[in-house]
Amino acid sequence: MTELLSGVRDRFRAARGGHLRDRRLLALLQGGGAPGERAHLEGCADCGERLAELRAFLDGLRREAEADCEAAFSPARLAAGRRQVGRRVRRAAGRDGARVLPFPGPAQPRPAVAARSRWWLGAAAAAGLFIGLAVGRFDAGLDLGGADAPAGIVTAGNATERAADPESHAGDELFLEELERVLASPNIPVLAPLDELTPRLAEVAVDVR
Amino acid sequence: MLGAPNRPRAPGRAADTRLAGDIKALLAEGDSETACAQFDLLVNRYQPRAARIAYYYLHDPSDVDEAVQDAFLKAFVHLPSFREDLCFEFWFTRILVNGCLDRLKTRTRRRRWVTPAGDDERERAERQTAAEPSPEALLLQRERRGCLAAAVRRLPPRQRTVVILSQLAGYATRDVARTMGVSEATVRVHLFQAVRSLRKALGGQRWLVEGRAPRSDPAVETGTR
């Protein structure tokens, strides 16, 4: 709407003898324009000069752009591009005999024979589980001497028994002393202050007892 | 003679549209071999212009090659949905321009995260392959074209499309309007704003108007388009 009003105003101005605006000059260059505007151009040197400037600018724009494009695209490059388009089009149309790898789809259902032969897998798993449980129970009975505590699980009862065993206690103390000795002599001087702040395992063990 | 050497003739367009319709029919009949051969004719006819349009958008010959190939492939794949009452050239140009704009968006997004490296060097190396008179002339030419490309690139997308199709690819205002799916008045408004911006950006570049013709009879000038 604004364009329309502006065009009407410009044409009115041209009809009155006023100079044409750039918008109208461009429209004239594009093949538009009213007869009154063309008549104005015939007699107005100023508008003619501006029109020539605008034309020269657009010509220069096109000339430089075309030269740039021609430098970038040699005939050989364009021919190679056409061949590539032809190849891709024939591939799309399925005319080049190219091998097409199928896109991975959902898994196909297995044949019935595989389903029938699967029963022994379940049986083998059940047998393995039974044998494993039996061996584990037998092994736990040998190590702990208890019937209810499985191997590797320390209950309150057997922990008390182990703590009360003087031989095992001496072995543990020996191990902790060795650990303390190693920890008491840090090899990295920078970590020495941090080591000083850390509570000793022996102190913790004494507190617990 | 603004744009006259590049402007395609209407009878050629009508014949190409008929050819596109024939290819569509061939594809419907399952004769894809003949359809491909016929489509090659369209490729031969439109590829140089398509490369030029894509180059004004992308300014990277490798990107342009891909964009043009993709546009032709897309046109071929979608030919079964092509309506013969439309002009094949405008239909194809729209596919091409949309593809270029998509590539520009992707490039902008990528550059937001990845620092480009070596683009200038690669461009320089490619330009060096062309036979140029002297390093100074080459430098000057590169500077001019860089200025021009940057000024066009800074235009808003619609104005840029109008300038590229109208001034650089040589389409008439009516054809630009049909390609973009807007009215001719809208095209004129965008073109005026774009030219004003370009003159502001390139106003100091005397080389643009160095080769201007001497002033002649205005009545003759106005009749050129």
Image: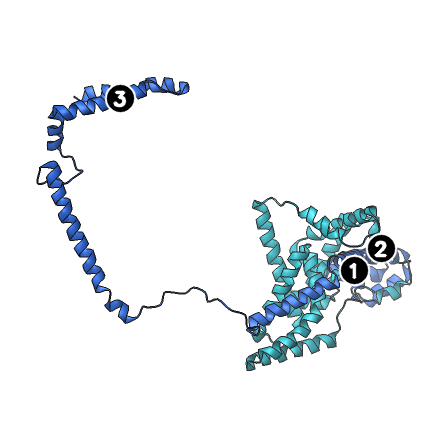
**Mark 1, secondary structure of its residue:** helix
Tell me the quarter of the image containing the C terminus of chain B. Answer: bottom right
Residue A6 falls left or right of residue A135? right
Circle number at residue A178: 3
- Residue holding disc 2: A53
Type of residue at label 1?
A: Leu
Residue B152 falls left or right of residue B110? right
Marks 3 and 2: in contact by CB < 8 Å? Answer: no
Q: Quadrant of residue A16?
A: bottom right
**Dot 3 surroundings within 10 Å: few (below 14), some, or many (20 or more)?**
few
**Mark 3, secondary structure of its residue:** helix
Chain shown cyan: that is B
At x 46%, y 67%, the residue is: A102
- The answer to whether residue B134 is above or below residue A93 is above
Disc 2 or 3, which lies upstream in sequence?
2
Q: For the residues marked 3 and 1, what is the alpha-carbon distance in whole angstroms?
A: 97 Å
- Residue holding disc 1: A26
Disc 3 or 1, which lies upstream in sequence?
1
- The answer to whether residue A7 is above or below residue A98 is above
Q: Where is residue A24 in the image (x, y as percent from the top left)?
A: 79, 60
